[in-house]
Image: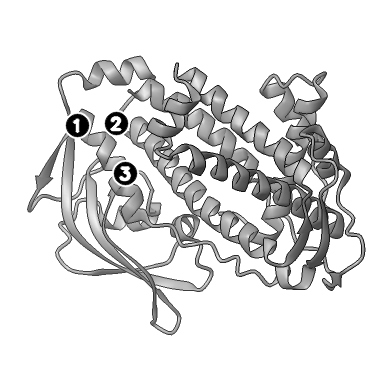
Amino acid sequence: MITIMKKISALFFLLVFFMFGCASKMPDVTPTTDTNKIPISKISTDYLNAVNVTNSTIEEIDYNKIAQFDSTLPIRDFTYISQNIDSILSVYYNMKPIKNTPLEKGNVIQFNLEIFDKSDNVIHKNTEMKMLFGYGYLGDELEESLLNTIPSKPLTFDFNDKLFQMYGLENAEYVKMNINGIYNYTEMEDTEDFLSQEGYSSFKDFYDYLFKLKVSEHDFEKFSELRSSFLKYAFDCCKFNIPYEDLRDYSRKVIDEHRKAAETLNMTLDDYYSDVLVVDQNSFFLMCAESAEAEIKEGLLIGALAQFNQTEIAEDEFTEFCNKNNVNTSDSVLVCEARYFFLKRAVIEQYVGSY
């Protein structure tokens, strides 16, 4: 199970790489609306040409309105994250509640957390979240002060660097914590063999892996939602011209991608959209056309914003990615696609940011 999960998480982190990275600062320019021919980055043009989109254009774009997009990322939900961690741990560990016993390194604590600003306003809260205790997840000083104690009342602490890494929250001043459960996680019969086979030296090592994975999955999910909102918002700030031929050709590409997905499952395309996508034939082809239209718009938009902001990809990062992932640099189409994805990542970060 975990071996498969590792393979999936490797693919997941590859997707994260395309969507996250070093945040870029927005250029100090005054956005305007340009109703003449809208120039777009050559990287986008090459990519669109490579997928047979040759005549589509942006006729109008309101750069100023696009720059006003609310790019506030949601605060991380560590209740949700800890529940996802627990759902995996429960397969390999028995969770035994401990009462009237001092906190020890390696216990898991369940607690409610309220975060306050300087004016004593609650700016964020988590309830019933769980976390491994004694290894600095909440900050070394905070955890050391609780070690060998039996917490029985709400506790108040300064907002430390570790909590800032978890939540962001520039205006946070202090936290109130109410520990309402302490647990000891003991291995099930086959857990020791599993840890050894998968390369984990201890419960803490396994927990570290799950914590990083589930935080990254949370960030990816929330960033994807914000990215989709940004693109939809930006599309509404543009006027596109997408000829029938371009839409037809790209729709065929989308359909072919679904056909390849069906083949990997040893299914016909009809069975694939009926049983996997759970749509009828008309809905499937409409979905493909809508997807094609959105992707063409996205290519044009990314190219226009990149050209306007003079956004460039980091060649050293691009070369490193190609080498690491064995990208065939002699395949011009693959290189166009990789360069475009790098450009898209950089452009979206300028408007949306990252965790």
Give the camera-side residue of 104 and 65.
65
Sort mark 3 into few (<14), some (14-19) or many (20+) by Cα contacts within 10 Å.
some
Q: CA separation, marks 2 and 3?
A: 16 Å
SS of the residue at dot 3? helix
SS of the residue at dot 1? strand
Mark before the other along the chain sequence, 1 or 2: 1
Question: Is residue 221 at least partly visible in the picture?
Answer: yes
Residue at 28% in and 35% down: 88
Question: Which mark, residue 93?
Answer: 1
Question: Which mark, residue 203?
Answer: 2
The three-letter amino acid code for the residue at tag 3 is: Asn
Sort mark 2 into few (<14), some (14-19) or many (20+) by Cα contacts within 10 Å.
some
Mark before the other along the chain sequence, 2 or 3: 3
> Could you tell whether 263 is left or right of 307 in the image?
left
Q: CA separation, marks 1 and 2?
A: 9 Å
Question: Which mark, residue 84?
Answer: 3
Q: CA separation, marks 3 and 1?
A: 14 Å
> Could you tell whether 79 is left or right of 94 in the image?
right
**Quarter location, residue 265:** top left
Question: Is residue 133 at least partly visible in the picture?
Answer: no
Locate residue 201, reporting x and y percent.
35, 23
Give the residue furthest to the left: 100
Give the camera-side residue of 271 and 353.
271
Locate residue 151, reporting x and y percent.
17, 60
Please state which of the two labelled residues, at mark 2 or mark 3, is closer to the viewer: 3
